[in-house]
Image (tube, rainbow, N blue to C red):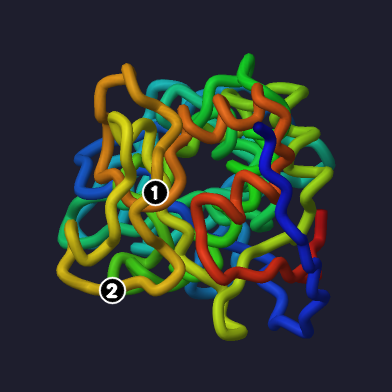
Amino acid sequence: MRKFFFIVLLLLFIQPVYAIRIGLQEGVRSTYVGASKNAEIIDGQTGKVLYEMRPLTAYTLKPNGNTFSIRIRRKNYKLKTNYIIIQPKEPKCFMGTKNRWYRGRLIVYNVDRKITVINELPLEEYLLGVVPSEMPYKWNFEAHKAQAIAARSYAVANMGKRGSKGYDLKDTPQDQAYGGISSEKPNTTQAVLQTKGVIMTHNNKIIAAYYHASSGGKTVAAKSVWMKDLPYIHSVNGYDSGIKKNGHGVGMSQHGANNLAQKGYDAYQILNYFYKDIKFGKMKTQL
């Protein structure tokens, strides 16, 4: 029997989060960067333009002592800085690295003679590359919307989590899988747009909305995994029995969310099922 929940959408005056920094690479000895259109390399320390980049051209970056060298047309040049920014010069220009395209801009550091590559972009644009990386794009649209809200809540609650590294979150399931624009799909993009700015709160704080692929039948409380209690996460039927457990089992089961969506639950009902005593708020966004 379909369960109905009373939904309260609370419009909160929450500090907006316009940009997020995602760690793409760390501790590598070489990488490449490029752009789909005209772009530029800027000294992050001085703001000086160091090089005008050609479209669809790969430039190899390597540490050169505590600074960088860049390979351009088979020649190596020194960039006398340990911090560069690679950014578009025109609209709809995407950054290339790690065999993918990304929105926003790239920030590159030389840290102890190894390279860290960061993608800085608006929060909502980041989510466009998270939802299809975390959940199969052919799944139910209401499950995609639930995933978008959970991912947004997790990201905002964990801003600065890896600040000592120069970024907020990794692009892997250690935080949230993120594939940039290369992973985007029309239906998951619509799920992000239709839930723009929506987050979950508990006691007026945005929650770290943990989720996992499958609980194997029953989700678990956070204290069972991490020895800390999260009052908004209880153990519940995961609606994913028969599917092998995959992940920590805390919070929303992605398979369970899809199965509930197939039964007729909407995104807010799904989230109210997996997270307890929550309210929905809305943040200001740039997208």
Residue 75 in the image, given as x and y percentages of width and height: 38, 29
Q: Nearer the viewer, mark 1 or mark 2?
A: 1
Looking at the image, residue 194 sits to the left or right of residue 257; the answer is: right
Q: Give the spatial CA distance, label 1 vs label 2.
A: 15 Å
Q: Secondary structure at mark 1?
A: loop
The kind of residue tagged 1 is: Val
Q: Residues within 10 Å of mark 2 (few under 14, many from 20)?
A: few
Along the polypeptide, which appears first: circle 1 or circle 2?
2
Q: Residue at x 65, y 34 (%)?
A: 144
Residue 70 in the image, given as x and y percentages of width and height: 39, 40
The answer to whether residue 23 of the structure is visible from this angle is: no
- The circle on residue 74 is none
In the rendered view, would you say 24 is above or below 80?
A: above
Camera-nearest residue between 4 and 13:
4
Residue 29 in the image, given as x and y percentages of width and height: 20, 40
The reply to whether discs 1 and 2 touch (Cβ–Cβ < 8 Å) is no
Camera-nearest residue between 52 and 193:
193
For the image shown, how many numbered marks are present on the structure?
2
Q: Residue at x 40, y 74 (%)?
A: 231
In the rendered view, would you say 274 is above or below 20?
A: above
| Residue beneath disc 1 | 236
* Quadrant containing the N terminus in the rendered view: top right
| Residue beneath disc 2 | 229
In which image quadrant can residue 253 be found?
Answer: top left
